[in-house]
Amino acid sequence: MSKKKYAVAIRDVIAEEMRSDERVFVMGEDIGALGGVFGCTRGLQKEFGTLRVLDTPISESGFVGIGIGAALTGMRPVIDFMYLDFVYVAMDQLLNQAAKLRYMYGGRASLPLVIRGQQGVGRGNAGTHSQSIEAFFTHIPGFKVVMPSNAYDAAGLLRTAIRENNPVMFIEHKALYIQTEEVPDDPDFMIPFGQAAVKRSGSDATIVATSLMVSRALEAAERLAEEGIEVEVIDPRTLIPFDIDTVITSVKKTGRALVVHEAHKNNGPGSEIASQIMEKGFRYLDAPVARLGAKACTLPFSLVLENAVVPSVEDIIQSVHEICYH
Amino acid sequence: MAVDVIMPKQGLQMTEGTIISWMASEGDSVQEGDPLFEIETDKLTIEIGAPATGVLLKILSQEGDVVPITERIAVIGEQGEDISELIAQQQSGPEQDQPTEPEHTEGPKTVQPAGEPAEQVATGGSSRYASPRARWKAEELGIDVSSIQGTGPDALVIEQDVLQYAQQAPKATPLAKRLMQQSNTDMDSVQGTGPRGKIYSRDLVSAEPVQPAAAQPEDTIGKLSGMRKTIAARMRESLDTAAQAVHRVDVDMYEAVRLRKRLKAAEIAVSFNDIIVMAVAKSLRKHPNMNSAFTDDGIITYGSVHVGVAVALDEGLLVPVLRNADSMSLHDIHQETRRLGEAARSGTLLPDEMTGGTFSVSNLGMFGIDSFTAIINSPESGILAIGAIVEKPVVIDGEITVRPICQLSLTYDHRLVDGAPAALFLQEIKKMLSNPYLLL
């Protein structure tokens, strides 16, 4: 085990996979000479050269297209998005091509393509640099959608993503890059997709939280415990595939559920999770499933307003009170 | 003349009631019909009027007491009336036939179970709504959720209310408790039929004359054997993948019967099954399209003819394979079929002897089955189901005559073979069986 920052854990897994598999290469804006805006590719070009660590023009649609072609012909590209908000520039390549090619080829082609980058709030980057994009990729079938909430999961899930033969949307969070945790040194350390982590055990209510919201849910749980409300916190880690079984097992115990994410609440991934809880665990519920997500407005530039738009620890505590009829 | 005030029966299901309050004290004058006391049952809370006009001479059951229905709880009479005799009757009156026990001298109060809290007084009516979880828990505990007062929003019954209710629910009604005391019955030996196994007096009545229910065999569930699992999976897989269609034909076995008799006379034992297997093998050689398998990569046409012969065991079905059956003599087929059948029954069949078939036959003639549809032994192209040989009237050359007839049913995979070529194959078998000398 080594203590690592989230961003360093990402870089190390990419480097290790590039060393062990020459088909792995990375592509993106300012990732070579600069090493990435957040340092996730720092030093890679020095070790692997400009052919395997490619600085691209500002042309997302173009370099995603190159990645798809490379993946179809046997390479294992890892495409870096400086901000995941920019996937909207490349939506045709991502959702009309990458998501569908394996199906279009009758399952006879594989598409080992990883799209990774950071999203979310925390730096006051405003409307086009602070969004959460997962809902688009959980809606259209074809991508596996991964959202690590800590350095340990980031390392284990990224290695699984690079070795996966289907396209993976690997969603990091800008506010988590400095999160530090013990990460296994094992060069084959992998966390399988579709396996949720129970971050905290409790008997009174279940919180399903993703990415940055996992730490907020845990903080809320600590404060609720002081009042005698024991909350179970589950991090699904991957939205596609989604480990509903772990969630239902928890809801069977607690009878109450709250889903928290940073993406907009309206038509967000929490709507799907809440529906599945009601479909598969209706009889266990003592209260309607609650949802928390960003308000239906553009992410503001002002940090004060930004904080007001996305769920806070206080919002989570209040919501748990509501489902517990306090 | 003194009048008894009794615990009234409010509704068919009521066996007892809790006295919540008295609206008059001993010595007060009461009017018939005026509210005298309030009771609570497991369904409702209700005020009960005085049964007569007079003076409330004696209150026998206090607030909080749980009293069986029809039990006297108070006496109304004239001022100064002596009711000591009446009250003394209380001890033995209702149960004169029963041996009097000391506890009874205290009157109905003894029905209040010692150490158990009185039923909680509901603050209002029961709730109309319960959360799914509350319903689930109530169902598990055998509690009627509609009898619970909810504490959730809009009086929603939630899990906590059910659990609390369950904790308070007494395990037996006072009447049942007293009956058990009288008959020295151990509470644990009685199966209650009420919520959460609460014991009612009727449970004791039904428990007394021991009438064991007519022994009805219970449903059982047996563990799946490995063989059963394999058969189940293979049958399902066969029906899920192959497009199975069936042709049937009657075959005149007259000559086959004669052939078998002659061979028998020469002390060469063969069965009809052997003759049919031989006809199938030879026909497969002539119709290679039936000696094939369907795969996504294309149709495999086998170079060899290996015929599987279904063998029924007690545990299930096995299909040992006659290799290169088309080049075997009738005698060889007979010997090999017998050897494989015995090996199957003794469990010594080798895995190789059960695999690699290209076509199968299944015979239920020995059970008198006229005709049946067999399921293809995947990935083979077909299976021939052989019925019993039965003497039937047939018309030959314009005359009715009796002939031994055997019905053959060919199940074939329509993905591989269409109806017409499958018919030609079955026709070939029929031809060979009608004139078995063609086989030799």
Image (tube, coloured by chain):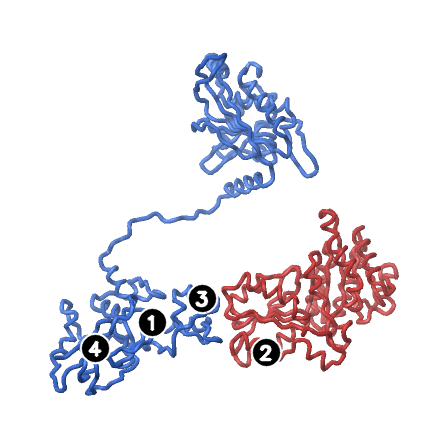
Which is in the foreground here, disc 2 or disc 3?
Answer: 3
| Residue B422 position in % (x across, y down) | 60, 27
Mark 2 neighbour class, 10 Å CA radius: few under 14, some 14 to 19, many 20 or more: some
Is B263 left or right of B356, judged from the image as shown?
A: left
Q: Disc 3 and disc 4: Cα gap in Å?
A: 40 Å
Residue linked to disc 2: A317
Q: Are marks 2 and 4 in contact (CB under 8 Å)?
A: no
Residue linked to disc 3: B135
Say if residue B116 shows up in the picture: no
Is A308 left or right of B128, judged from the image as shown?
A: right
Q: Disc 2 and disc 3: Cα gap in Å?
A: 27 Å
> Which chain is red in the rendering?
A
The hue used for chain B is blue
- Secondary structure, mark 3, is helix
Q: In this rendering, do the residues under marks 2 and 4 share a single chain?
A: no
| Residue A175 position in % (x across, y down) | 73, 74
Which is in the foreground here, disc 2 or disc 4?
Answer: 4
User: The residue marked by circle 3 belongs to what chain?
Assistant: B
- Which numbered disc flags the more N-terminal residue, 4 or 1? 1
| Residue B185 position in % (x across, y down) | 24, 65
Q: Quadrant of residue B174?
A: bottom left
